[in-house]
Image (cartoon, helix red, strand yellow):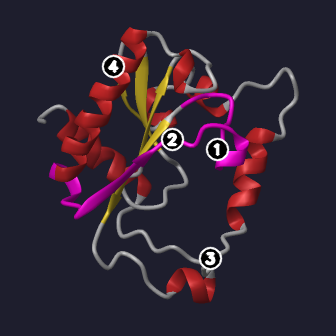
Amino acid sequence: MKILWNPWRSEYIRRFTEKTESEECLFCRLQKLREEEALIVYKGKYTFVVMNAYPYNTGHLMIAPYRHVPDLTELEEPELEELSNLVKKVVRVLREAFRPDGFNIGANIGRAAGAGVPDHFHVHVVPRWVGDTNFMAVISGTKPLPVALNEAYSIIKTYWSTV
């Protein structure tokens, strides 16, 4: 098995896992910001959709409950239902907006599973394209993204209301 190291992620992850007792997690902080500032695409009754500010690919979105719970087993049925419906909506929106060839959809529950924010459950939806890997990440430690974050946010917000 070949391993591709991406040490830049450790600094990002450390910012959210090495917190004091008084600090809030990323998803709890984002809820208090203006939608545009937080890159929140949609606010539901129980959950919200937010762009990943450090995306693996253009259009990388996350769906999280407002409640601070560590995994899906602690979600109430209405929260889980809304979250599931939003995963479906996100896929439809991203298909229209960016025409990906596929998606990675999943949740990392707990630090051992790779969760960057282990105490607040969330689901990632990452659009993927055939051939979207290249030598840049390996040679220079750089992941090229073809669309700027604020432009991707604007595109997603536009398609959100039409899909």
Residue beneath the point at 23% across and 61% down = 100
Residue beneath the point at 44% across and 84% down = 134
Q: Does the CB distance between marks 1 and 3 fall below 8 Å? A: no
Identify the residue under disc 1: 115
Q: Is residue 56 left or right of residue 161?
A: right
Measure the alpha-carbon separation of dots 2 and 3. Answer: 20 Å
* Kind of residue sitting beneath label 3: Leu
Residue 98 on the magenta segment: yes
Please name whichever residue, 114 or 49, is drawn nearer the observer in this view of the structure. 114
Measure the alpha-carbon separation of dots 1 and 3. Answer: 18 Å
Residue beneath the point at 64% across and 33% down = 26
Residue 75 on the magenta segment: no
Image position, residue 68 (x, y; %)? 62, 19
Identify the residue under disc 3: 4
Q: Earlier in the sequence, mark 2 or mark 3?
A: 3
Image position, residue 85 (x, y; %)? 27, 26
Please name whichever residue, 76 or 129, is drawn nearer the observer in this view of the structure. 76
Identify the residue under disc 2: 107
Quarter holding residue 30: top right
Q: Quadrant of the N terminus?
A: bottom right
Classify 125 as above or below 146.
above
Q: Disc number at residue 82?
A: 4
